[in-house]
Image (cartoon, rainbow, N blue to C red):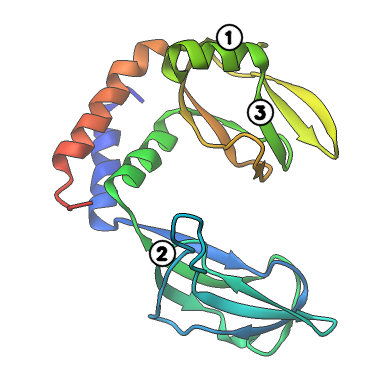
Amino acid sequence: MSNEIDFDELLSKYKSDPFDYVDVFAVHTGRVSFKVVEGEEVNAASGEWLQVPGTRLYEINRERNPKIIAAQTNGTVAKIYTEFDGQFVEAGEKLMTIKHPLKKKEIIENILKEVLLLFPAPETAKYFFAMDIQSRIEKKGARAVTIEPGEEILTMSLMKRDTPVYYQGQRGVIHSIYFKQGISVARGEPLLGICAPEKLTLIQKIITRVKADWDTDH
């Protein structure tokens, strides 16, 4: 992480290809009917209350119960697996890929995810900060909160049962929070990005550098 050359390489990667490629999967088993074509622009739900629905990507029909799946991200349909159109697919089958143009803020987050220590969700569940951590965040802000190995940092709420989650990893500050309290997070997705205290200045340098180098208007 202290190797500046690696960071230069990361930055040039995003400069040459400033996109995320978001795969879209079948939400459950059923017969698929595509509603978009390759190259089409798609939009996520928008409006203050997300009252404007996202672009319809596909319909999946199981036992005569059709369900429309809308885009969760803005971008262009880069690839559609047209062989599945009109076919019965299993849950989790990859149906298409959306090419999402990254904003400067997202590029910073993506680079940070590669340099921070990520603490992943142990199970698909809802997460809340442990009371002690929550009160420290409220008093000082997350980046002033240092957590130690073995410390109880989160509560995992699954099937109406709450289980404490203990931090496994090296001592560090909570630099980034990737979850919203009470919203379900998939197993393996990052919950927190932890930064060793001595690396905070390097992280700040990365953020400043991206902001200065990035010549887009985003």
Q: Could you tell me the amino acid type at mark 2? A: Asn
* Image coordinates for residue 176, horizontal then vertical, percent: 45, 29
**Residue at x 14%, y 49% (from the top left corner):** 215
**Badge 2 density bin: few <14, some 14–19, many ≥20, Cα 10 Å:** some
Q: Secondary structure at mark 2?
A: loop
Q: Count the marks.
A: 3
Residue 146 visible here: yes
* Image coordinates for residue 125, horizontal then vertical, percent: 73, 40
Q: Could you tell me the amino acid type at mark 1? A: Glu
Q: CA distance from mark 2 to mark 1?
A: 38 Å
Rendered-image quadrant of the N terminus? top left
**Residue at x 21%, y 30% (from the top left corner):** 208
Asked if residue 93 lies left or right of residue 70, the reply is right
* Image coordinates for residue 118, horizontal then vertical, percent: 53, 30
**Badge 3 density bin: few <14, some 14–19, many ≥20, Cα 10 Å:** many
**Residue at x 24%, y 56% (from the top left corner):** 16
Residue 11 quadrant: top left
Question: Which residue is the site of mark 2?
Answer: 74
In the rendered structure, find residue 177 and report the number of the disc placed on it: none
Asked if residue 61 lies left or right of residue 4, the reply is right
Q: CA distance from mark 3 to mark 2?
A: 29 Å
Q: Nearer the viewer, mark 2 or mark 1?
A: 2
**Residue 146 versus residue 98 in the image, above or below:** above
Question: Which residue is the site of mark 1?
Answer: 148
Q: Earlier in the sequence, mark 1 or mark 3?
A: 3
Given residues 113 and 70, the one toward you in this image is 70
**Residue 15 versus residue 99 in the image, above or below:** above
